[in-house]
Amino acid sequence: MYFLYLAKVKKNLFFLFAFFALSCSWGQISYNITLLGHWNGAPNSDTTHLFTQKYNEIWGYAQNGREYALLGGVSGYYFIEVTNPTHPVLRAYIPDLISSRCINRDLKTYSHYAYMAADNCANSSLIVADLSYLPDSVHIVYQSDTICTNIHSMYIENNRLYACSTRNPGGVTGFYKMAVYSLQNPERPQLISVLNEPFFSHVHQVTVYNDTAYCSNGFDGLFVYDYRNPANPIELMRITGYQYSGYNHSSWLSPDHKKIVFTDEVPHNLPLKIYDISDFNNPELLAHISSSTNKKYKVPHIPYWVGDYIYCSYYSDGLRIFNVSNPANPVEVGYYDTYPKNDTLAEASYVGNWGVYPFLPSGRILASDMQTGLYIFDARQAVSIHQSPDVFTETQVFPNPATDFIQIQGSNYTPGNIRIQITDMQGKILSETQKKTGNILSEQLGIQHLHAGVYILTLTHEQGKVYRTKFVKN
């Protein structure tokens, strides 16, 4: 959210389920996305002044064959089991003992720990919880304002926590645009770096890959830093003054880490942008993306790029899924509007879908609505197998689900070299091999080393043709 853009917003009460009755008059609320389950268990009295907001960020977690939604509420954090998506069950709740009625909260996981922080309220705290006791309970192992009092958003890579727009980190009084903490001891993060460059006012959100931080810095644009030496981050690139620029809110990298998608939250109706960043010296715009809604006010919030698809949450416009197998020509392939009622400027500012989480092992999608809570979706109709013609038209991958191996079988191939990759749902390469083939491909890949979950298999022919499919490891 844009945390400097909150004044003069009218208070408005509405019936939480009115959109079901009104859906016909406001058009189709979904396409290629099926609602499996819904949870709205926070007390109706537990709201902010902003259109009866009850919820904010969403994250996911899986262990021992069970799946959980981690949902931010204005006064604390909900841990909801979604293993049976049609029957979500609240397993734990952690209240914020220092500050309630926080507009913005963030949740991230590392190993079996959850990290929780808040902003846009009075001083809060960092909370660390041990999730290994789920589904019975969660255990708080740290809850104090000595590490910091406020964090707007977080990202965790390797054993570092990147904290954006942090107040009083490590007991140092003041505001810092970004602070970095070591998680060498996961229960006691240690401050190792602060970023206070003069080129921007704050870091709103950050995405990190291989110690490279992609910082969304509000109206100042997108900046990229090398954090291999956290004590001395080095600027690598900046994208500023671009077409349809606004408040640069959030970003995510493509699976090959050569492209980036980012949102501009304010003003309304700005499209998502896709850039080729394979050359930091020459970032190149590939596409603008807008949702297909006929609403007057579109507010893209948080995007994720998984395989050939971008999942993006929109205030008042719901979850949107775009096929970007050709990044220069994105196509909207699915949507679900969690708040189809409104079409006014004031309401569009702060209602509807805050966040989305597309990384559960089951492949199900989690989304949070600020007024109506947790949504659990099946998006398989929108997210289908992508394959290029001519080379891979007769390809099979089996068994699926699999336990020890998967078999790739294909015929009528164009002879040549094929790269075979297995990646996780976030695009991390887990195995890669090259195979020279004639007209027939027969290859067995061992997957014993993989944890249970959903993975992506990609075959890339030397001619540039691509075959991509998902498989499940039991």
Image: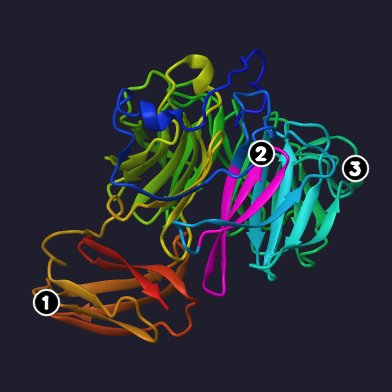
Residue linked to disc 3: 172
Instruction: Sort mark 1 into few (<14), some (14-19) or many (20+) by Cα contacts within 10 Å.
Output: some
The residue sitting at 73% across, 36% down in the picture is 119
Quadrant assignment for the N terminus: top right
**Residue 428 against residue 373 in the figure, above or below:** below
Residue 411: mark in rendering: 1
Amino acid on which disc 3 is placed: Val
In the image, is 270 to the left or to the right of 248? Answer: left
In the image, is 187 to the left or to the right of 427? Answer: right
The quadrant where residue 422 appears:
bottom left
Residue at mark 3 to residue at mark 1: CA–CA distance: 64 Å
Whichever of callouts 3 and 2 sits on the residue coming sooner in the sequence is 2
> Would residue 278 be seen by someone viewing this image from the given angle?
no
Residue linked to disc 2: 43
Q: Secondary structure at mark 1?
A: loop
The quadrant where residue 412 appears:
bottom left
Measured as percent of width and height from the top left, residue 91 is found at 64, 59
Which residue is at the front of the view, 158 or 293?
Answer: 293
Q: Secondary structure at mark 3?
A: loop
